[in-house]
Amino acid sequence: MRRAALILLVAGLALAALVVFGGLQPLGAAVAFACIAGAALVPWQVHDPDASREIEFGANPVETEVAHALVAGMPDPNVLLDRAGRVIHLNAAAAQLVPALRRNELAQFALRAPEIVTALREAIATREARRATYLNHVPVDRWMELIITPIPVPTAFGGVDYCMLLTFHDQTPLRRVEEMRADFVANASHELRTPLAALSGFIDTLQGPAREDARARERFLGIMHAQAARMARLIDDLLSLSRVELSVHVRPETIVDLVPIVCEVVDGLEPLAAERHVEIETALPETPVLICGDREELLRLFENLIENALKYGASGGRVMVSSRLDVSSEGNPEFRVVVRDFGPGIAPEHLPRLTERFYRVDAGDSRAQGGTGLGLSLVKHILNRHRGRLLIESVPGQGASFTAGFPPARDVSEARS
């Protein structure tokens, strides 16, 4: 139609010039223009097979919008490469997984894991599918499986070319479940041995020599109740720790306010503070402190930190809970919630190991306080999932300070990204 319009325009101008300057009759000019218009509008090329083939193979099939839509619609991270290894299409999941990927650039520059590079070179050379498993350390450890699938593509001259479809599968949940199972069995069998042995011994005593001793029975039942409660706390902490480790690679998406969460924890621990004769002082901002977080996990985090301060720093008589906006060592803004006690403090040699599972500065005192040795390990993993960090400072005789740092949520779109 565009060519016909151009022909009709030129013919009309030429006939008009002939009518004005050449003496051509208007009626003859109109008849001539009608004939030219009829000839120009006939679709001569509608059934031309050569023209159809030219249109069909005028562009690379994998560079069409259809191919782009197919790759973009896949739920897993997917990248389509040409035979040289340059990126043709990638979906949003792949761009989030590997931000360095760019269209029309070599994928090897962004995918630097040796396993990926080796598998990609073999797939391009042999035109056969390849698999590779690798560990991605940024921003947290994730086990990934890469499947490289060669895709035959017809060429304009009847030949066949090959593109490479890279599909990434996140194997982290499966690995976490396996590690969780192994850790749970190992840790539970180790830590539950002592209370189970105590319960078994007291039961034997109550069934034997102390069968008719009411005083001994009352005393032993109290100890058995304490040991059973200790086992329940231990199992609860192990399950909580396993759940957090299972999802540590998935950052929370919900925007929450830290201030009411901390206040709720402080209010819930007031009876324990009164029992230990400790005063809880708070210095929290009146404006919201917004982060991307999981409310239940944050409740557990601050409950562990404040409860530890009340139990192990009770001799200081007070615990301070404060919050402020600061700057991290990398120069990024960071919300910090500080829990400080004024108790005996912690010796420097213990500080690097406080977040290890079942590590205790004083094992006897920890068990007497009802601790499981998992509280700070759980705090560390919750902060890792929230892309935060834990800072511990202490001077013997001057108390200890535990700081939980969180990156702020700038807006709702960041929470969903």
Image: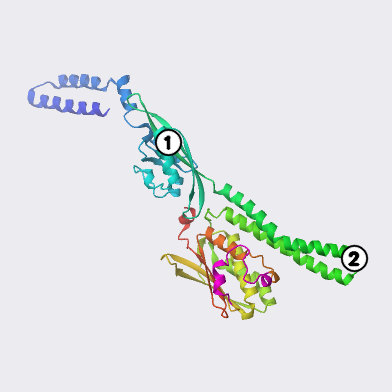
The secondary structure type at the circle numbered 2 is loop
Q: Residue at x 90, y 70 (%)?
A: 213
Mark 1 → mark 2, Cα distance in angstroms: 76 Å
Seen in the picture, residue 393 relative to 37 is either above or below; the reply is below
Residue 240 in sight from this viewpoint:
yes
Decide: marks 1, 2 in contact (CB < 8 A)? no
Based on the picture, tell me whether residue 349 belongs to the magenta stretch.
yes
Q: Amino acid at mark 1?
A: Ala
Seen in the picture, residue 396 relative to 297 is either above or below; the reply is below
- State the image coordinates of residue 142 (x, y, percent, origin top left): 51, 51
Residue beneath disc 1: 123
Q: Nearer the viewer, residue 186 or 38?
A: 186
Kindly identify which numbered label has been placed on residue 211. 2
Going by the image, does 35 lie left or right of 125? left
Going by the image, does 373 lie left or right of 195? left
- State the image coordinates of residue 246 (x, y, percent, origin top left): 58, 53
Q: Amino acid at mark 2?
A: Arg
Image quarter of residue 107: top left
Label located before the other in sequence (1 or 2): 1
Seen in the picture, residue 6 relative to 210 is either above or below; the reply is above
The secondary structure type at the circle numbered 1 is helix
